[in-house]
Amino acid sequence: MSELRNQVMWNRLISIVEEQALALVRTAFSTSVREAGDLSAGVYDTRGRMIAQAVTGTPGHVNTMAAAVVNFIEDIGHHQIYEGDSYITNDPWKGTGHLHDFTLVNPVFRKGTLIGFFACTAHVVDVGGRGFGPDATEVYEEGLYVPIMKFANRGVVNEDLLNIVRHNVREAGQVVGDLYSLSGCNDTGARRLHAMLDEFGIDDLEELAEFIFDRTAIATRESITALPPGIYTNTMRVDGYNETIDLAVTLTVTKDDIHADFAGTSPTCANGVNVPLTYAHAYFSYAMLVALAPEMPSNWASLAAFTVSAPEGCILNAKHPQPVAVRHVTGHFVTDLCLGAIADVLPDVIPAEGSGALWNFQVSARASDPTSDLPPREVLMFNSGGTGARPALDGINSTAFPSGVRTMPAEATEQSGPVIVWRKELRPGSGGVGRQRGGLGQVIEIGPAIGYQITVSCMFDRVANPARGRHGGGEGAPGAVHLDDDTPFDAKGKQAVPDGHTLVLELPGGGGLGDPAGRDPDASANDAAQGYVT
Amino acid sequence: MSLRIGADVGGTFTDVVLDADGQLHSTKVLTTYDAPEQGILDGVDTVVAEAGVDLANLDTFIHGTTLATNALIGRTGARTALVTTDGFRDTIEMRTESRFEQYDLNLVLPTPLIERKDRHVLHERIGADGTVLRPFDDDEARALIDLLIDRPEEEAYESIAVGFLHAYVDGSHERRFRDLLLERIPDIAVSISSEVSPQMREFERFNTVCANAYIQPLMASYLRRLEDQLHATGARCPVYLIHSGGGLLDVDAAIRFPVRLVESGPAGGAIFAADIAARHDLDRVLSYDMGGTTAKICLIEDQTPRTAKTFEVARTHRFTKGSGMPISIPVIEMIEIGAGGGSIASVDGLGQIRVGPLSAGSEPGPASYGLGGTEPTVTDANLVLGRLSAETFGAPDIDLDDAAARRALDVSISDQLGLEARTAAIGVVEVVDENMANAARVHAVENGKDVSAFTMIAFGGGAPIHAGRLCEKLGINELLIPPDAGVGSAIGFLRAPFAYEALRSHHATVDAFDHSAVNQMLAELANEARSFVSGAIASTGVNPSDVPLEVERWAYMRYAGQGWEIPVPVDEASFDLMGGELLANRFEKAYEEFFGRAISGLTIEAIGWSVRVTTPRPPVDRVERIGSARDLISECTRTLHDPATYETVEATVVARESLVAGDRLVGPAIVIETQTTTILSPRQQAVMQSDGCMLITPASIETEPEAGHP
């Protein structure tokens, strides 16, 4: 009977962390939280091992979060943990990879005894410094750095910290609001947990945690057997910020675990596209889970099977004080890199390469006439190219992978700032050819609203290095960036769009898979009829 | 004498209820897919004969149907074209650019309702503030119309959807295109987004107008046929349709906006529960409807079901959020999960029992039906646990086979986990109950509510079996099982008011509040809603000006920067110079209710507005709560397994029809009736109420009034 009880409680724990995450989504201000699901929530045992995690939008927090709570316990100290406490950090190396992510951890006490923790992470609107972008050359420029400390001590909020935050960030009200939301959602989780423990008449999580870890460890090992033990390697070249980046991985597969080593990867660069190893680790773990164990719940035991290493100074193992603000631009490619390593042994599972990194950009709109009273505005847009073709399916058109980002409606974008989205539609012919076709990229055309000029901060990859096809499939179309009259526009950096012009972005397509000659004639006919191909 | 009929055409059954001066006669007939009106007419014959009344005296016929939903799911609508703004041809295909399932490499996004080759563009453009950025060109439009018409017979478009960018701000370009189109082909069906769904967010709005256009020809011909045939039988009354927001529309309005009929059956269930709530004077109710395939849960506060501005239909993947198509119309807000009597149980790679969302449906059905099903379902588990029995199962055609249920559980569950069949069955019902409890909790959290303070009203064939345990899991102390629960939705139709909700996106900040613009916009919405309601009232032969109408107004507000708006009630009085401040106060109060704490120093804005006009709810007969007058003791018992304690108990078995007001039944007990079975755990008791509802509470409540959670 304890078997059934444990199963039911496991289900309940997952529901509890989903509720915790939902409470956060509903109250967060950050665009990337609500549009990208850039948040995470989980419950931990007293040793900081993650027992359950909510399935949220983006894999970037998968095991950055799993590792974070151990750091909190270490830095706060076991003897300093009291009922009513709440801890905080945005340390990129102890949290989730950049200063914009705040992680809050609350201990849970029952009958006076510590029984575990709830933790959550969200990307806040601003952390001061230069603002969100790759331009800093040291993490000091990227904003306020809050080391692991108490956000609340025995129920009393640390007003000194809040005062510092208020005076160091733009949009202070929203950021402080988000910190309260984060801590509050942990409390929601704790309340639900107590109700569950009441119902089942138990007072700690120890036995349940062991049950979950045992089950998960066995199932994870079982999943890994799909890969024959051995060594698998892959390299991938991407555009990078100011110079080409080579990414390299060597996977060592044993019957119990998989280790990724990133030796051979290019060194760090001067700007904030460097990746703390914990973040690269997350996208590697995601690659393995999505390929081998898609049903596996994320917890300490499922993630323990996936370990990483990288030479210091390589771009996937940036160290303090290197800049890391937009680590996702490089980090998102880690998934395709690792999937590519096992593509030959799992030909029926692994897709071709896709557009990988998002084509997000920030538009700064300023009045054309400085004496007018039109206010300056910033507009952020999320956009995705095509995904790689799958062994039995075409790639997905203009859809994020591995990220879970949603786009914003053009109407909402235009309501929130003085820009006009003239075009946002599929880019015919951009999917790589193959038995299965790569997903199509998209074309975006954007210009200022009347009375404004715009500057666009570009951070676009796969312009020089398109997504590669697999098993005989063709490359996806590379991205392209230009003005409406075809004047070239740099894919990187901040540039003004000249008056009277619009900016055109052609997002890359996904790679194809298999010999194009083997494509189903009906599928080819449909491609032509719908105008998916040119 | 007042005679009213409600007819609910569902996936399996068509329910018909006749209300003759408060006396109900009901029947269930099989849905006739090819011509749903046939099943309705058969059912009408049955109830009319039973009541011994003359159809010619029928006052009202109220209808709800899954036909619209089925056409969207089965893609059996009209050949439809979309005409949209240049640059946005692929909006309904690109969706949100995200994957609804993070860990599925073989994810397939739903196919757009209208294929790319049937999507056409015009070079017009209206800006976010209503400025015309590119004028509408009549010549270009006429050329496109030529192209739309000039097609081979078998590819001819039957319906046209028009969706232009920012048409919710200014619909003039859409209307101009419609005028030109109708000038050329006067009888083609055409839907424009500024009328069907004037809400911001192009993917949702375009998809909604496409859905409306797609089902319009089908629904128009069906509704006209139904009307004709009803009248041919001698009925002279008007026909009304229940809409997804829970009100009634006349046939003409339903034909203009058939997309508002999507999900109308579940809306009837919510109205049914709201009516029971009103009779019992309950302000906080959770309605729980469980059928063969899904369970639906809805919050009903102040006897009014909660409504939303948008929902998702035709989910293609395990009822997963994001895997269906968004429809932006006013709708009774509920969550639906794949948990029903037919839900299939299995064991996953982690050795965990999983239930649903796949359902065995009615073919092959649960293993115990003996119709070829081999996979264990929730019904099979209930049978093995003694919660259902072959002797008393409702459907006369089905002879439940206990051994088959046990076999199926053994093969799929017990053998995998080394459990005996009974333990496996407990696992199955615990998991499905847990799934439903989790869904209910999450739904409550989304609305800032704590579900344990609510009363549950359970109906639908499966709900009374699971409701008792569900209440234990949710900490709910009051459960009502109404009479005639099996045809609850159709009864709900008879309780529905004439109502229409008009919605519009209109951006306003409280700091720079243009009260006259908002007043004007709200007046327009009120007029729009009022015209639909008045039209429907007029068709009953009553002068609409004699009917007092209730008006509810809502603003959908948030802190600037947030992505979620919360509904904020707005008084009927016009806004004045203090309007912004008033709204800000209202918002902060509502925000606190949702999230516990308002935030100071932030800009507050309203994004959307709605006005709902409704006929007043007729006064109901209040049901006074009665305590137990006598304990019911029955000689008849059955062995029952209690999933909470894993113990085996002897449960009293009684027939519901033998219970009279004041009877108290102490659990463990099983109450049997034609269409369902109610289970009381050893910790619960039921007291029969004067209106035939069973009130179920924890048995400890009376003796230990202070006891809270166990």
Image: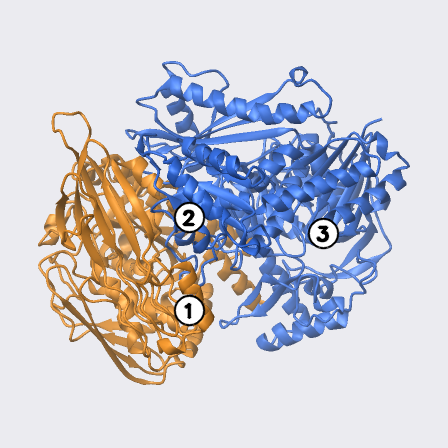
Chain colours: A orange, B blue
Mark 3 touches mark 1? (CB < 8 Å): no
Residue linked to disc 2: B120
The chain to which mark 3 is attached is B
Residue type marked 3: Gly
Residue A125 in sight in this render: no
Between circles 2 and 3, the one closer to the viewer is 2
**Figure check: B401 above or below B200:** below
**Residue in the picture at 55% in, 68% down:** A3
The chain to which mark 2 is attached is B
Residue linked to disc 3: B461
Res A524 label: 1
Mark 2 touches mark 3? (CB < 8 Å): no
Residue B315 in sight in this render: yes
Q: Which of these two is toward me, B247 or B533?
A: B533
Which numbered disc flags the more N-terminal residue, 2 or 3? 2
Disc 2 to disc 1, C-alpha distance: 22 Å
Label 3 and label 1 in one chain: no
